[in-house]
Image: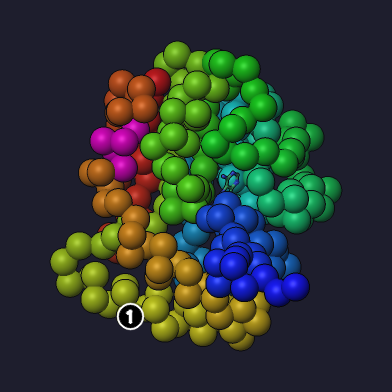
Amino acid sequence: MTDAAAPPDAAAPAAPTKPARIRAMFTAIVPRYDLVNRLMTLGLDQRWRRQTVAAVAPRDGVVLDIAAGTGDLAFEAAKQGARRVLGADFCPRMIEAARRKARRLPQTATVRFLVADAMSLPFADASFDAIVNGFMLRNVADLSATFVELARVLKPGGRLACLDLTPPRGLMRHFFSLYIATVVPLLGVIFARNYAAYRYLFDSLAVHPDADRVAAMMRAAGFRQATYRVTGFGTVAIHLGVK
Ligand SMILES: C[S@@+](CC[C@H](N)C(=O)[O-])C[C@H]1O[C@@H](n2cnc3c(N)ncnc32)[C@H](O)[C@@H]1O
């Protein structure tokens, strides 16, 4: 007997959800992730990470680096004097890479890594003095819901700093669009053998809310203050929220 009565696509596998796609994409680029980051930001990414961590004044606090990737913000928080740092990411391969890096670096005794989803964190309310994240905002399935979850695990008065690309304004818009649409994927092909993951930067930025809109989402999620500064020739925003 044939299956003629079934809808034509009944046997077709469901399209992967955004989290599944994102996790698979980052899993594929783990080995060259740091190298391509340095190259495509012309080495500026570590300076932005230092500024992001400094914005939450981590000294003596308990800090969460969410969507930690290979852990650079977590290591920076330890360097800037945090008492305890947790780095969490929903991509197990990234967490393995972060743990390997921690074994090679000084000043990482206070840093631990775990696999966890930013949208459903395995922590009690008011667990952290500060939360940082780098290049996460474009990747989560629901940014507003993520801000609500981050606010939940922050102590009252706690600080959240988010570093990510932001849609540039003015003349820079054309130059930067060209750069991330062409040069960045080319670097991805040459150094990570992956066009799609680096083309995704352009695609995700095209639908990413501008910095004012992100700040409004933070306020709606319960941050009593939400400000930002733009750097990287207008292409990067560092958002700061105070709960
Ligand atoms: C572009 S990388 C940034 C890594 C690191 N923060 C940095 O500054 O280089 C984005 C990371 O976000 C993680 N990610 C995306 N969505 C996530 C989620 N819902 N929960 C936890 N991690 C997530 C990805 O697995 C990936 O490691």
Question: Is 56 left, or right, of 125 in this rendering?
Answer: left
The reply, left or right, for residue 85 in relation to residue 138 is right
Image x and y of residue 25, in percent: 62, 65
Q: Is residue 140 visible?
A: yes
> Mark 1: which amino acid?
Leu
Q: Residue at x 60, y 61 (%)?
A: 14
Q: How is the image coloured?
A: rainbow
Provide the residue designation for mark 1: 178
State left or right for residue 135 relative to residue 231: right
Crowd band around label 1 with a 10 angstrom C-alpha radius: few (<14), some (14–19), many (20+): few
Q: In front: 229, or 119? A: 119
- Provide the residue span drawn in magenta: 214-218
Q: Main secondary structure of the magenta part?
A: helix
Q: Could you say where residue 171 lies in the image, as x and y percent from the top left?
A: 17, 72
Most extreme residue toward the front is: 1
Q: Residue at x 44, y 28 (%)?
A: 148
Q: Is residue 33 visible?
A: no
